[in-house]
Image (cartoon, grey):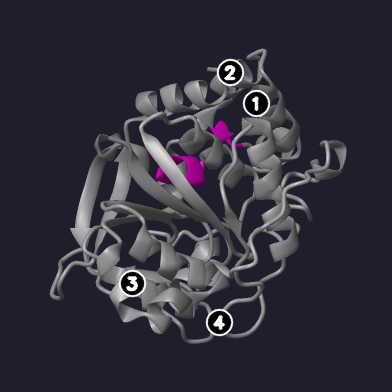
Amino acid sequence: MKRTFIVDTDCGVDDAIALLMVLSSSDVDLAAITTVAGNTSIENVTRNVCLTLDIAERDVPVYRGCAQPLIGNLPGIGGLMGSDGLGDASAGLPPTRRKSESERAALALIRLSRQLPQPLTLVALGPLTNLALAIRLDPDFVQRISRLVLMGGAMYAQGNASPTAEFNFFADPEAAKIVLEAGFADLWVLPWETSVAQALPWQEYDALIALQTPKAEFLRVITTRVRGVLENVFHLPGMPLPDPLAMAVALDGHVASESAFLPAMIETAAGLGRGLMALEWFPQHSPNIHLVKRVDFAVVLSMLQKALSDS
């Protein structure tokens, strides 16, 4: 019996890889993809999802979501992943003819959570704006999500968007606060530092892009810019893959080889702490997240190899 997934994404380079992973999983029915602005504009994100579906040769309904966070504006975009979210490579890819559905993402999440078979897994790879809206519109939405796996937060306050905050939570702290406090029964968080500590070594990356498949070529094209920055500017020994690691945890719970069940809170005040995920390592409140500290990277690598094959 297939498991049912929905993916909410701000589709940049690593989101696209994560989508290829779930699309290659024969035991998963990907019922829908919802989009949210983050890595790039909502128009680009939605197009990037459609381009990824083209490469995978799969038909999945796409629902366009929020173009802005709940409060204020998105932080500056166009950095590591380029202005288009795909390493400035989208202009060189065949244009997509796919169109998103007319229903907006938050409303689609509510409707689908009522209609799809249980258990239902929701994977969130970008700012949590769509999820927060769904929770506010229908508080019972939380009870219909069997498992929520998200990429976000910095467990040691070693941020990539500010000195203390990871990008997804920094982009919409109010939404992150709503989601983490909503009471999801089984909530897993893959933080930024885990992806840095267990990056894809460049030797393994080279082996993946050398696979003679359209998906491997897609990976090479969209990651060329990212690799140059990570290797030559930041001198990293490999490519952090935050969204693929989160997807791996969603696909196989055993991938999370080390985790901690902890209370987590989000700082929403202005200043250096905005978007900070505060963790109680010596809990005095009720735990609300399973924090993924390490993954079985050999399993992740096998998932990546499968996702980039033609089978």
Reply above or below: 132 against 226.
Answer: below
Residue 299: x, y in percent?
Answer: 36, 26
Residue 70 tag number: 4
Q: In the rendered structure, which disc, 3 or 2, sits on the residue that comes first in sequence?
A: 3
Quote the CA–CA distance across marks 3 and 1: 35 Å
**Amino acid type, residue under disc 3 in the picture:** Phe
Question: Disc 4 to disc 1, how far (Cα)?
Answer: 35 Å
Q: Tell which circle, 1 or 2, labels the residue nearer the N-terminal end.
A: 1
| Distance between the alpha carbons at the discs numbered 1 and 2 | 8 Å
Determine the CA span between mark 3 and mark 2.
36 Å
Where disc 1 sits, the SS reads: helix
- Label drawn at residue 141: 3
Is residue 264 visible from the viewing direction of this image?
A: no
Q: CA distance from mark 2 to mark 4?
A: 40 Å
Q: Does any portion of residue 132 appear in the rendered image?
A: yes
The magenta-colored residue range is 236-249
The amino acid pointed to by label 4 is Leu
Residue that mark 1 sits on: 215
Amino acid under label 1? Answer: Lys
Q: Residues within 10 Å of mark 2 (few under 14, many from 20)?
A: few
Left or right of 143? Residue 73 is: right
CB atoms of marks 3 and 1 within 8 Å: no
Q: Quadrant of the N terminus?
A: top left
> Which residue does the numbered mark 2 point to in the structure image?
310
Horizontally, residue 14 falls left or right of residue 27, namely right
